[in-house]
Image (tube, grey):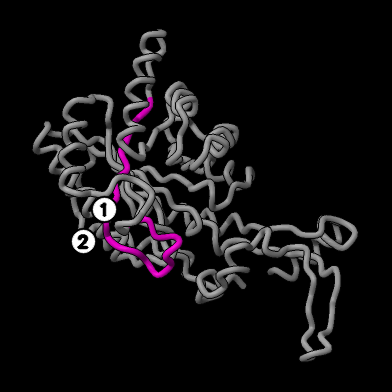
């Protein structure tokens, strides 16, 4: 009960006007229930990772790793934080689209998976792998290539990364496809494919179409290069949060899994391919609440409205403050 927990926190001096001005409370039982559902609806050859950007709080991240999840990092800082929170390197994804040479070298040295954003970055990986091999420390990192399956934009344009104007990944044109297949034919260390069509504002149908495109490309590479050539498929995250109800609907795990199994059956039946997910907000978005102090209350002489000045505002809830229709947090 929120009121009971808040009263207890105030009585302990953990939050209040003369203590911490704000606090975030997590229902870890709810989070664990979501994790268990993920493991139930997807088969054992799926490896689930947690998108650090959705909640970069060490206690939550440690809880995730303790319960068998990997981490998806979009920066070197997130990567390092993930390692400190107990994430094994082989369960850590490095997805930054702007990796420097030193960052790539560090990731290769650590053995984390690198999801390459473009052909130039792939060239850096080739060069740096050779450097490490020459030094007697060959890399154990998996390497996947991110392409854009071009399934179109979602309802929130700013979060859509699968239309023709997306800055991330390489668009799947015929020319790019042939170039990528050639990379799989000549670079034995290249393990797999990576996609992420967007976050929030995407339908399950759009997410599934992206995965179907990825699996079709993987199958074509297997046919044209050699059987079992694509060893890893990273299908990203993007499960939409259900902000329309106060209870239930933490995410759409069951519906998404059922749709994938129906439309992309080999994703489930081919147990020789590691399938990676990168869910974030859908795991924790409805398992937490924030309490904060009201420092001042003002009354408008114009229309009689009361204005409350809080300690938690646009700094913590930036998306809700500037796009309330897309992120209507209560």
Q: Secondary structure at mark 1?
A: loop
Residue drawn at x 74%, y 64% as measured from the top left: 291
Q: Secondary structure at mark 2?
A: helix
* Residue furthest to the right: 18
Instruction: Classify 10 Å Cα crowding around label 1: few (below 14), some (14-19), many (20 and above).
Output: many
Residue drawn at x 78%, y 68% as measured from the top left: 310
Instruction: Classify 10 Å Cα crowding around label 2: few (below 14), some (14-19), many (20 and above).
Output: few
Does residue 289 appear anywhere in the picture?
Answer: yes
Up-down relation of residue 136 to residue 305 (above or below): above
Magenta stretch encompasses residue 154: yes
Q: Quadrant of the N terminus?
A: bottom right
Label 2: which residue?
A: 262
Residue 232 location in percent, x, y? 28, 38
Q: Which numbered dot is residue 149?
A: 1
Residue 206 location in percent, x, y? 30, 63
Does residue 68 appear anywhere in the picture?
Answer: no
Asked where in the image residue 230 lies, by quadrant, the reply is: top left
Residue interval drawn in magenta: 141-162
Residue 303 location in percent, x, y? 77, 91
Up-down relation of residue 105 to residue 285 (above or below): above
Q: Which numbered dot is residue 96?
A: none
Q: Is residue 6 left or right of residue 145?
A: right
Q: Is residue 323 left or right of residue 278?
A: right
Residue drawn at x 48%, y 47% as measured from the top left: 50
- The earlier-in-sequence mark between 2 and 1 is 1
Q: Nearer the viewer, residue 167 or 238?
A: 167
Asked where in the image residue 286 lies, by quadrant, the reply is: bottom right
> Are discs 2 and 1 less than 8 Å apart at CB?
no
């Amino acid at each position: 009960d929120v009121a009971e927990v808040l009263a207890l926190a105030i009585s302990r001096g953990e939050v209040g006007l003369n203590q911490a001005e704000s606090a975030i409370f997590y229902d870890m039982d709810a989070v664990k229930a979501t994790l268990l559902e993920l493991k139930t609806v997807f088969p054992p050859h799926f490896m689930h990772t947690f998108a650090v950007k959705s909640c970069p709080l060490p206690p939550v991240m440690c809880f995730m790793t303790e319960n068998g999840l990997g981490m998806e990092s979009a920066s070197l800082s997130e990567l390092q934080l993930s390692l400190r929170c107990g994430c094994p390197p082989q369960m850590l994804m490095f997805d930054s689209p702007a990796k420097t040479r030193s960052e790539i070298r560090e990731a290769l040295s650590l053995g984390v998976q690198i999801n390459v954003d473009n052909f130039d970055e792939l060239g850096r990986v080739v060069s740096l792998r050779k450097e490490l091999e020459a030094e007697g420390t060959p890399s154990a990192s998996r390497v996947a290539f991110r392409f854009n399956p071009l399934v179109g934009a979602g309802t929130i344009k700013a979060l859509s990364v699968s239309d023709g104007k997306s800055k991330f990944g390489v668009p799947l044109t015929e020319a790019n496809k042939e170039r990528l297949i050639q990379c799989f034919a000549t670079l034995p260390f290249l393990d797999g494919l990576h996609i992420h069509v967007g976050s929030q504002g995407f339908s399950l149908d759009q997410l599934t179409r992206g995965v179907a495109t990825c699996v079709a490309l993987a199958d074509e590479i297997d046919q044209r290069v050699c059987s079992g050539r694509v060893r890893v498929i990273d299908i990203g995250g993007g499960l939409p949060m259900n902000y329309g109800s106060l209870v239930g609907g933490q995410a759409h795990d069951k519906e998404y899994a059922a749709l994938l199994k129906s439309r992309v059956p080999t994703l489930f039946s081919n147990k020789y391919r590691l399938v990676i997910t990168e869910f974030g907000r859908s795991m924790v978005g409805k398992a937490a609440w924030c309490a904060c102090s009201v420092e001042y209350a003002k009354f408008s002489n114009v229309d009689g409205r009361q204005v409350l000045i809080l300690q938690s505002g646009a700094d913590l809830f930036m998306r809700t403050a500037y796009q309330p229709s897309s992120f209507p947090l209560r």
